[in-house]
Amino acid sequence: FFGFATIANAAVMGVQADYLARNQTILAPIGMQALTVIFSLLFIIELGFNMWSEGRLFYRDSQKRGWNLLDVVLVVSSLPELVLLLSGSLDSDFLEDSNLGQARLLRILRVTRLIRIVRITRVVRFIRALRTLVHQIASTLKSLIWGLLLLVLLMYGFGIMFTQ
């Protein structure tokens, strides 16, 4: 269920980003804000269930420690936006006034939206084939970097040779 929720949240974030870019606005419509709140609450509940069911293993299990830490960081980073959305502090009149406190609030909102993008990586945990593919790509990065370095050196060498 939470894997599906993660994928649905990624889709909603994409639609929301498209809406904000097309309409040159800071705030999404109330329906998208409601979905953001629902997904944030779902992920808070999931984290609570995981912590409760795994107990001390939540912090000690070396295989899941990275994913658990990612979950905690994502949930904690979504709390400021959740508080702002639930408190009603975010409305267009409030954000359009130029005030230093409101600028900080807007910056916090943008940073939490950027961090929410990381939540998409949680999908990797649920789909084994995707996890294998990501591992394979990550393991070839060293060769890719050396190949790019060789290409840059060749281009540099030929650039010097052709200019003389």
Image: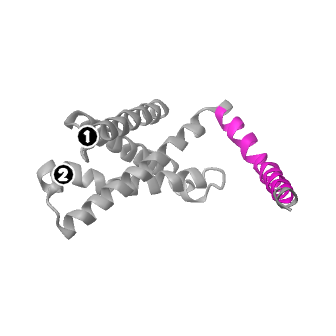
The magenta region covers 130-158
User: Residue 155 at what x, y percent from top left?
Assistant: 81, 54
Residue 164 in the image, given as x and y percentages of width and height: 86, 62
Left or right side of 154 for 24: left
Q: Kindly identify which numbered label has been placed on residue 90.
A: 2
The reply, left or right, for residue 33 in relation to residue 74 is left
Screen quadrant of the N terminus: top left
Q: Amino acid at mark 1?
A: Ala
Which element is circle 1 on?
A: loop
Q: Residue furthest bottom?
A: 100
Residue 123 position, x and y percent, is 54, 37
Q: Is residue 6 above or below residue 103?
A: above
Task: Tell me where residue 154 appears, x and y as whole percent.
Answer: 86, 54
**Residue pictured at 34% horizontal, 44% vertical:** 40
The residue that label 1 is drawn on is: 28
Distance between the alpha carbons at the discs numbered 2 and 1:
10 Å
